[in-house]
Amino acid sequence: MKQTVRSIIAIVIFIGTITTARAQQAPTVPVLPNFQALIKPGKIQLDWISGFPNTAQIGIQRSLDSVLNFTTIGYASYPTESRNAYLDNKPLPGKSYYRLFILFKDNRFMYSKTVLAVPDSTISGTTILGAGDITNATPGATGTQSAVPWKPSPYIYTTADGNVNIRLPQAPQKKYSIKFFEPTGTFLFEVEQVTEPFLILEKATFMHAGWFNFEIYEDGKLFEKWSVFIPLNYRN
């Protein structure tokens, strides 16, 4: 009898240990007024848990400086749900800050905390894509389907998460600007001044996968002219 009781206790402790371990491994979603903004391939995902059942509307606002110029970019589809999410499918280049405007059914309102979008730690963002990763891609408008005589720039390159990384260690001391072009030469957009030594451009900024040309200018002079490839899919 004692042996049976001991066996039952051991089983209960074992099950409890497994349950606790799984609970510790499960990602924690913040509760309003906190929320999280994670950079994923081609988008930024906002997640939160709400304890406000009388919510009428939740507006998602975005800014590049975290203080001013917040613009409403969309609304939560189901604002009364306790677990909620929003996808920013057209993120802007550089850092993006978000906050939520929460309107209640009695016309009261509040703002969430302001959150900086950070890379999703579950997606590899450190492996640089090289020529071996894109040997079946067409380099530019007139390339072939054979091996690509190309290697990534040390300053602008794509990582395994599909995003474009800009690494300019002297950015705080010098003035850098970057222009991006289609392979045909059509101008896309310009980063007028790079102020941080490292930043990430979401792949959605480029609207499609494939090759893109770029020009880096240092103090007004051409510093590098090269190309970068954005894959259609990404790998972990």
Image (cartoon, grey):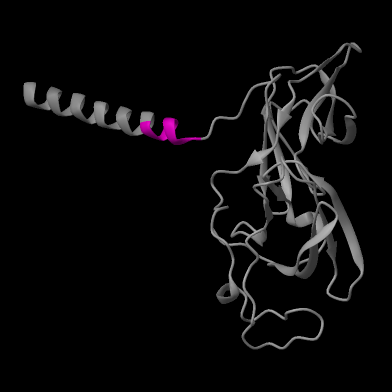
Magenta-span inclusion, residue 82: no
Instruction: From the image, give the main secondary structure of the stretch colored magenta.
Output: helix
Front-most of residues 165 and 59: 165
Q: Position of residue 213 (x, y in %)?
A: 79, 69
Residue 7 picture quarter = top left
Magenta extent? 21-26
Residue 53 picture quarter = top right
- Please report the residue visible at 71 percent of the width from the left and 19 percent of the height from the top: 33
In the picture, which quadrant includes the N terminus?
Answer: top left
Is residue 103 found left or right of 2 in the rendered image? right
Front-most of residues 203 and 57: 203
Q: Position of residue 94 (x, y in %)?
A: 76, 44
In the picture, which quadrant includes the C terminus?
Answer: bottom right
Q: Position of residue 133 (x, y in %)?
A: 58, 73
- Please report the residue visible at 64 percent of the width from the left and 82 percent of the height from the top: 149
**How many numbered circles are shown?**
0
Query: Would residue 28 be seen by someone viewing this image from the given angle?
Result: yes
Q: Position of residue 192 (x, y in %)?
A: 86, 48
Is residue 194 found left or right of 3 in the rendered image? right
- Please report the residue visible at 65 percent of the width from the left and 39 percent of the height from the top: 118
- Please report the residue visible at 54 percent of the width from the left and 59 percent of the height from the top: 127
Most distant residue in the left direction:
2
Image position of 88 with respect to 234: above or below: above
Query: Would residue 1 be seen by someone viewing this image from the given angle?
Result: no
